[in-house]
Image (spheres, rainbow, N blue to C red):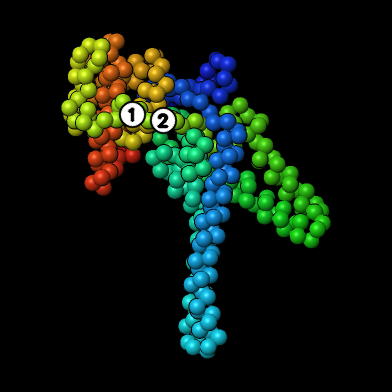
Amino acid sequence: MSAAPASLRAGNDRLRRMVTPEGIELPITLASRGSRFGALALDLIFIGLAMLATTIALAMIAGGTFGEIAAKAHKTAIEHALEFLFIVWIAAMFLFRNAWFLYFELGPRGATPGKRMTGIRVAARDGGRLSAEMVIARNLLRDIELFLPLVFLLSASDGGDMGAAGIAATAWFLVFALFPFFNKDRLRAGDLIAGSWVVEAPKRKLESAMSVGEAARGKESRRTGVTYKFGDEELAVYGEYELQTLERVLRENRPEATVAVAEAICRKIGWSPGSGDERAFLEAYYTQLRARLEAGMRFGKRKADKFDGKP
């Protein structure tokens, strides 16, 4: 069960608390409007370059075919080949425009290349895992928010006279483009429909907690001297999504979140939670969970979250 996230009462109006399905409150920072715009601009540039490269490659393939048509050699077969290349081009353009966002945001990082470069990612507002339905919904809305009004605007301006259609298309575009300025969570219409928001991603890895050798022998607490070593069954209850959540908790290093998450993991794996050594416990669990997941991916196994693999 999860609760709606609540705003933090702090000077930074982008700070929020996300409540996970386990009832744990985690602090997050919403992405700024500037970083979101920058990420979209970068992704559109990458998509444009990919489209251009694909077009050039298919044109080069078709170039030799046109030469054969001129020589009247196998004209019918070659025309069919050109039609096929044109269909491939249309399909590629469609996939680049739509599947680009779906593919990358459905990945474990929840971020396109543009979002990664600007240090942001997509997250579910209910604190759960970002689902395929959410990603599809927020990206299908992008056609209505951005591409359709731009197409109408370009069509209306072709004749040099904007007219009523051009004015309507401009108003349509501006309403959706300015939508993030009129809500406190900086949501686009797609985020509102999908139940998602865009947050700042961790800017650095926890290098001290990622040693494979340390994972193999267990991590010793500097405070108590206890060595934390977890078995496969204890690590198998969580997946990539929980690993990312745990990394965020360790990076933020907020005492209340550290204690809450350590207690939740202990309950889940059947340990008796100690007091005062939660940070060392979480570092050990993070190290060994990460090592286990990375080893699984090397052998073609992947666990998206704690529900993956359950009937």
**Residue type pointed to by label 1:** Glu
Q: Is residue 80 left or right of residue 274?
A: right
The residue tagged with tag 1: helix, strand or loop?
helix
- x%, y% of residue 48? 56, 54
* Residue 13, horizontal then vertical, whole percent: 58, 21
Q: Considering depth in this image, is 311 or 253 the residue closer to the camera?
A: 253
- Secondary structure beneath dot 2 equals loop
Quadrant location of the C terminus in the rendered image: top left
Q: Which mark is residue 204?
A: 2
Q: Is residue 29 above or below residue 79?
A: above
**Residue 267 is at least partly visible in this image:** no
Label 2 Cα neighbours within 10 Å, binned few <14 / some 14-19 / many ≥20 = few
- Please name whichever residue, 68 or 182, is drawn nearer the observer in this view of the structure: 68
How far is disc 2 from disc 1 in space, using C-alphas? 8 Å
Q: Residue 80: image x %, image y %?
A: 49, 79
Q: Nearer the viewer, residue 136 or 105?
A: 105
Regarding residue 31, the answer to whether it shows in the image is: yes
Amino acid type of disc 2? Arg
Q: How many marks?
A: 2
Tag of residue 267: none
47 vs 120: above or below: below
Residue at 24% in and 16% down: 221
In percent of the image, x 20 and y 25: which residue is there? 218
In the displayed structure, does residue 36 sit left or right of residue 133?
right
Quarter of the N terminus within the rendering = top left
* Residue underneath mark 1: 207
Which residue is depicted at the point 51% across and 74% down? 62
Task: Judge the density around disc 1: few (<14), some (14-19), many (≥20) Cα neighbours within 10 Å.
Answer: few
Evaluate if marks 2 and 1 touch, with contact meaning CB atoms under 8 Å apart: yes
